[in-house]
Amino acid sequence: EKEKEKEKGGLGWKRGRLPVLVVCVALQIFQQICGVNVVVYYTPQIFKKAGVQSFTFIGDQDLTIMACTALSYLPKIPAVFVAMRLMDRAGRRRLLLALVPVMGFSLVLLVLTLLLLDEGSTLF
């Protein structure tokens, strides 16, 4: 029994598990600051740069942009459930290897679109 207690750290953790926890937490932090959440965070500015005008029934441009942001975020909710189902069936590694090029292409397309908008053109 004393040997089992020696294997555990101060909080009941087995020794050697702290580096694993640090890596997992760091990966989640990097995912949050580099993933789709960054694009969602800047969605109002993207819509403003794209030249979104106010809807007649809303009136204010800022309220219109916030409504567009909320509407663009709505498809993410069911997509999370679809992704969970796909991960269970296809596996995380296979999905990651198949979809990383798609994510890269999407980010390049987003950057090119924003660069074009910086030159003064509007999409709408």
Image (cartoon, rainbow, N blue to C red):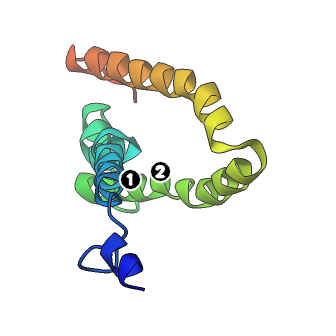
Q: SS of the residue at dot 2?
A: helix
Q: Height in image: 108 above or below 37?
A: above
Hey, which residue is sitting farthest bottom in the picture?
1
Q: Is residue 59 visible?
A: no
**Marks 2 and 1: in contact by CB < 8 Å?**
yes
- Give the residue drawn at x 28%, y 54%: 22
**How packed is label 2: few (under 14 Cα within 10 Å), some, or many (20 or more)?**
few
Q: Position of residue 27 (x, y in %)?
A: 34, 46
- Give the residue drawn at x 29%, y 59%: 18
Hey, which residue is sitting farthest front in the picture?
2
Quadrant into which the N terminus falls = bottom left
**In this picture, residue 81 sits left or right of residue 12:** right
Out of 124 and 48, give the one closest to the viewer: 48
- The residue tagged 2 is 72
Disc 1 versus disc 2: distance between alpha carbons?
5 Å
Out of 60 and 71, give the one closest to the viewer: 71
Q: Position of residue 7 (x, y in %)?
A: 35, 71
Q: Amino acid at mark 1?
A: Thr
- The residue tagged 1 is 69
Q: Height in image: 67 above or below 90?
A: below
Q: Position of residue 96 (x, y in %)?
A: 58, 34
Q: Amino acid at mark 2?
A: Ser
Q: Position of residue 53 (x, y in %)?
A: 32, 43
Out of 99 and 56, give the one closest to the viewer: 99
- Give the residue drawn at x 36%, y 45%: 31
Out of 92 and 106, give the one closest to the viewer: 92
